[in-house]
């Protein structure tokens, strides 16, 4: 078991692409950290640098107490699970799982015992003689996990391991993966672009964009207190409502046309600068809808209705044609065109400085 | 999938047309072979008889004398100028050239596929460009170089030539195959505790093997059939089978049946080899077409 320390990691590819730009992440011993970001944000490159499959341009990587900058992947005592599983097609499932053990030149009896133990743990003992091609994607993923687990590495590195599965299987595997990590207690760095997966799996989430680290924190912390505009827009489904505003006298948050005007308490307004372009962020569950248009902070009109069963998502059109999404219980049952009153939960407003993208708290 | 059962489903007429076309194609390709085989078992008088005789035992009496004559090592003058000697040359030259070209070309292709090579596209174009001219165009310079280096009438000389002419083909074919093999295999093997060389040996080569076989077939056939260079760069009494066959014509009266017998023996190894690897051949050739 070991921690991973990534310090000021920079990776510039030949040709000048700056894939990773000064990223520092600490994964504590036994922790499950999810590296989350859109495709091309540098998360996979970061992971590959930790694995030693890419050599960083600058920065240090420690695994446990060892500085591993110059070590080849084979000497880092890690296991890597690939998006396309990368099972060796000409080897049976048994030989695939035994492959890393053979590299370590373990005695045959121990290889055999360990492979069977892992196969049992992952419920794939009946597949040991098959070739990877004849397995379903879920089974392939189990074999890939088996190959990672069997050598008992210090660190697991997983690169979008669930992306290639259909959604029902993905949900199952997510649960299993989390359970497995709890049971083994192995430090895990997990890359995904799927925020639901990140929220569900990680002890901590590290959000990346354009090669830079945006925020690291526990899932709910990142959800409730996004540190940057990017995190606010990326995490949450539906995404956070964002609106250009400035702080005007009143005090109130006002959109550039003056049509949208949300009065805020003086205590709240004190934290925000005046005359500076701001972004107001409101999560859809923090908008409360009342059937009476004169109730709440301001009136709005129902624009689109998306009933999801357990809740309904309404697109509401405010003055100045701003549209915001609001979640409401299905009992409310509004129709397109209904006039409603909307109130904003003041304690859960997010305000960002447009210039820096940072949250103002 | 293009399988004949789909034709069956369509209609009887469709089936008839399908099999007629197959039969016509087979006839077109196989009849010359059949005629060559017939000629090889005919007496000298039967070979050129008119009307032609197509059916052994009925229209003419078959004989193995031609094979015996061709295979005898004392048939024509010096020891070197015999069919078995030329055949041995062909096997050694073709085999060595194929093995060396496929190994060198595969390694080159792997490097081009996996590593950042400076001027990669220019180099690849240059490699390919050596195949753009008809080979005969460079006959004179090659002849001069050959002579200066003392390569005429040597095993090394003609083998070297075939290796070099086979290499571009191998590099291009194998690069295509390697590009289709996901890099993650090597990545995975390297993380699993192996060096890159071990990863290539244990994972990539087993995957690439069918492609190597397919490529080898083409290189071997080219070397096996090459006539112009081996004839013009060596003296008459030294060479592979193609110039030897040509020589038979030269001896006054042309011994058609002996020539046919020699040709039948000559094509047998290549037919057998191609037949043995035919499954790999199909997989090798279609390899690039299958997407993940």
Image (tube, coloured by chain):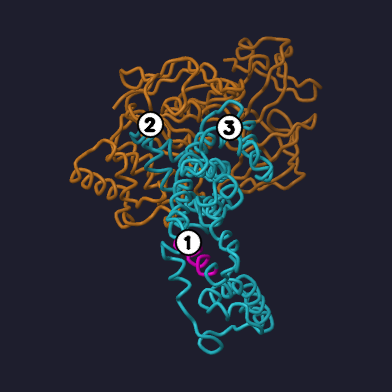
Q: Where residue A191 sits in the image (x, y, percent)? A: 47, 33
In percent of width and height, residue A64 lies at: 31, 21
Residue visible at 61% across and 15% down?
Answer: A268
User: Judging from the image, what is the letter of the chain drawn in orange?
Assistant: A
What's the chain of the residue with tag 2? A
Q: Nearer the viewer, residue A18 or A233?
A: A18
Q: Are marks 2 and 3 on the same chain?
A: yes
Residues at discs 1 and 2 in contact (Cβ within 8 Å):
no
Residue bearing mark 2: A188
- In depth, the one of B140 and A26 nearer the eye is B140
Residue A162 visible to the viewer: no
* Residue behind mark 1: B76
Number of the label disc, if any, that sits on residue B163: none
Local packing at callout 1 (Cα closer than 10 Å; few below 14, some 14-19, many 20+) is some
> Mark 1 touching mark 3, by CB under 8 A?
no
Q: Chain of mark 1?
A: B
**Considering depth in this image, is A1 or B65 the residue closer to the camera?**
B65
Quadrant of residue B126 within the rendered picture: top right
Q: Which mark is residue A38?
A: 3
- Same chain, marks 1 and 2? no
Horizontal relation, residue B101 to residue A156: left or right: right
Mark 2 and mark 3: span between their CA atoms?
A: 20 Å
Among the chains pictured, the one given cyan colouring is B
Quadrant in which the N terminus of chain A appears: top left
Classify residue A360 as left or right of residue A137: right
Magenta region: B260-277
């Amino acid at each position: 078991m070991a921690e991973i320390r990534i310090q000021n990691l920079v990776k510039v590819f030949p040709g000048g692409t700056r894939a990773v730009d000064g990223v520092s992440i600490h994964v504590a011993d036994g922790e499950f950290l999810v590296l989350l970001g859109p495709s091309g944000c540098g998360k996979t490159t970061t992971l590959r640098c930790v694995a030693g499959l890419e050599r960083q341009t600058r920065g240090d990587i420690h695994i446990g107490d060892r500085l591993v900058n110059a070590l080849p992947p084979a000497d880092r005592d890690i296991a890597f699970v690939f998006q396309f599983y990368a099972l060796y097609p000409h080897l049976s499932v048994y030989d695939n799982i035994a492959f890393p053990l053979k590299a370590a030149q373990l005695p045959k009896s121990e290889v055999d015992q360990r492979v069977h133990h892992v196969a049992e743990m992952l419920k794939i003992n009946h597949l040991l003689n098959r070739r990877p091609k004849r397995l379903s994607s879920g089974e392939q993923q189990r074999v890939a996990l088996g190959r990672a687990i069997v050598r008992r590495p210090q660190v697991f590195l997983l690169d979008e391991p669930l992306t290639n599965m259909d959604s029902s299987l993905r949900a199952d595997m997510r649960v299993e993966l989390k359970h497995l990590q709890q049971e083994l207690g192995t430090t895990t760095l997990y890359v995904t672009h799927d925020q639901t997966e990140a929220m569900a799996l990680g002890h901590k989430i590290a959000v990346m964009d354009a090669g830079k680290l945006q925020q690291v924190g526990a899932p709910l912390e990142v959800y409730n207190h996004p540190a940057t505009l990017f995190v606010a827009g990326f995490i949450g489904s539906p995404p956070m409502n964002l609106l250009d505003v400035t702080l005007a006298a009143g005090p109130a948050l006002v959109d550039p046309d003056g049509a949208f005007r949300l009065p805020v308490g003086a205590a709240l307004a004190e934290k925000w600068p005046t005359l500076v372009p701001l972004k107001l962020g409101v999560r859809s569950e923090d908008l409360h809808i009342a059937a009476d248009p004169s109730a709440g902070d301001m009136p709005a009109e129902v624009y689109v209705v998306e009933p999801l069963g357990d809740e309904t998502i309404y697109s509401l059109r405010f003055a100045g044609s701003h549209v915001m999404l609001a979640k409401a219980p299905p009992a409310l049952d509004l129709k397109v065109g209904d006039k409603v009153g909307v109130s904003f939960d003041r304690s859960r407003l997010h305000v960002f400085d447009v210039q820096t993208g940072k949250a103002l708290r | 999938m293009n399988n004949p059962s789909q034709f069956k489903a369509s209609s009887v007429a469709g089936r008839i047309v399908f099999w007629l076309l197959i039969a016509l194609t087979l006839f077109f390709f196989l009849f010359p072979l059949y005629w060559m085989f017939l000629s090889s078992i005919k007496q000298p008088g039967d070979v050129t008889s008119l009307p032609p005789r197509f059916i052994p035992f009925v229209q003419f009496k078959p004989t193995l004398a031609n094979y015996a004559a061709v295979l005898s090592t004392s048939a024509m003058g010096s020891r070197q100028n015999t069919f078995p000697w030329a055949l041995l040359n062909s096997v050694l030259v073709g085999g060595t050239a194929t093995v060396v070209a496929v190994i060198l070309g595969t390694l080159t292709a792997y490097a081009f596929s996996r590593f950042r090579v400076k001027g990669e596209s220019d180099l690849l174009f240059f490699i390919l460009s050596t195949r753009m001219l008809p080979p005969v165009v460079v006959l004179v310079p090659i002849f001069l170089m050959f002579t200066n280096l003392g390569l005429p009438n040597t095993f090394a000389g003609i083998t070297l030539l075939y290796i070099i002419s086979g290499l571009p083909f191998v590099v291009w074919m194998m690069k295509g195959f390697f590009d289709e093999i996901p890099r993650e295999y090597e990545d995975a093997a390297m993380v699993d505790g192996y060096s890159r060389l071990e990863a290539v040996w244990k994972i990539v080569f087993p995957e690439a093997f069918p492609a190597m076989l397919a490529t080898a077939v083409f290189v071997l056939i080219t070397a096996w059939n090459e006539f112009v260079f081996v004839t013009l760069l060596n003296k008459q009494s030294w060479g592979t089978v193609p110039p030897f066959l040509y020589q038979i014509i030269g001896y006054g009266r042309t011994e058609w049946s002996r020539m046919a017998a020699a040709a039948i023996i000559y094509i047998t190894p290549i037919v057998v080899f191609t037949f043995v690897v035919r499954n790999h051949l199909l997989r090798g050739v279609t390899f690039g077409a299958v997407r993940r």
